[in-house]
Amino acid sequence: MNGFETIMAWLDENVKMHAKRRTTLGYLVTAAMMVRGLGVLALGRAVDSGTTAKHAIKRTWRFLRNPDVECTAVHEALFRQFCPKRGPVVVLVDWTDLYPYTQLVFALPRDGRALPFLSKTIYKEGGEGSRIAAETWALEAAGATTLVRGGIAQDEVEPGDTIHVRCHPLRDGSNGCLLGFVTTSGGVEKEWD
């Protein structure tokens, strides 16, 4: 199996997505593995779909600006694929500047690299309130099941409960943290890691 066929087999099995968008994503992932830059032109020219470069570039551009692309399905599949099956789950968190936007990125560490599995992009001009809202959105996305896997008993956390988290700063001093403690709505603090 070549790279494209391997990627398509994984996408078909793990990502619920419109078939044509899934195929385009397969071509783009294959192309991204072969090029240094990730611009629309570089990706489009590297797509090997048997069409002209002009068509591949247009296809790439349409895919990347399509608001209906099932990003959440891809993020969930990546997380399921690369999340450790046992033990604590380390999640790297970082804000990235993409003027005029800023992006909150969550990634799993994998072989010395960060594998992003979730992101939220907001306008920079939105201020600190927008950042706090994005961080709250991301923590809410974790869900009770993730907490239970981390050692919090199921009857301690119910969907909709408010929890408080405390993080350990990263050892290298970079932006981000390792989730260290979770305090349930009952006021009981549990060590997460």
Image (cartoon, rainbow, N blue to C red):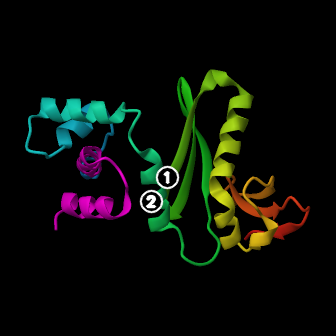
User: In the image, residue 122 lies at what x, y percent?
Assistant: 58, 30
Residue lying at 47% horizontally and 53% vertically, measured from the top left: 75
Q: In terms of secondary structure, where does tag 2 sit?
A: helix
Q: Is residue 141 magenta?
A: no
User: In the image, residue 101 lies at what x, y percent?
Assistant: 55, 28
Q: In what quadrant of the picture does the C terminus appear? A: bottom right
Q: Earlier in the sequence, mark 2 or mark 1?
A: 2
Q: Nearer the viewer, residue 29 or 164?
A: 164
Q: Is residue 160 visible?
A: yes
| Left or right: 6, with 174 as reference point | left
In this view, the mark in front (2 or 1): 2
Q: Is residue 53 above or below residue 154?
A: above
| Left or right: 107, with 37 as reference point | right
Which segment did they paint magenta? 1-29
Q: Nearer the viewer, residue 68 or 35?
A: 68
Q: In terms of secondary structure, where does tag 1 sit?
A: strand
User: In the image, residue 121 lies at what x, y percent?
Assistant: 55, 35
User: In the image, residue 84 lies at what x, y percent?
Assistant: 54, 72
Disc 2 residue type (three-letter) = Leu
Q: Main secondary structure of the magenta part?
A: helix
Residue 78 got which mark? 2
The quadrant holding residue 40 is top left
Residue lying at 54% horizontally and 44% vertically, measured from the top left: 119
Q: Nearer the viewer, residue 13 or 181?
A: 13
The quadrant holding residue 77 is bottom left
Query: What whole-number distance in Å separates the C-alpha atoms at marks 2 and 1?
Result: 8 Å
Residue at numbered disc 1:
116
Q: For the view shown, which residue lies furthest in the right direction?
A: 187
Q: Is residue 112 visible?
A: no
Q: Are marks 2 and 1 in contact (CB under 8 Å)?
A: yes
Q: Nearer the viewer, residue 29 or 63?
A: 63
Disc 1 residue type (three-letter) = Pro
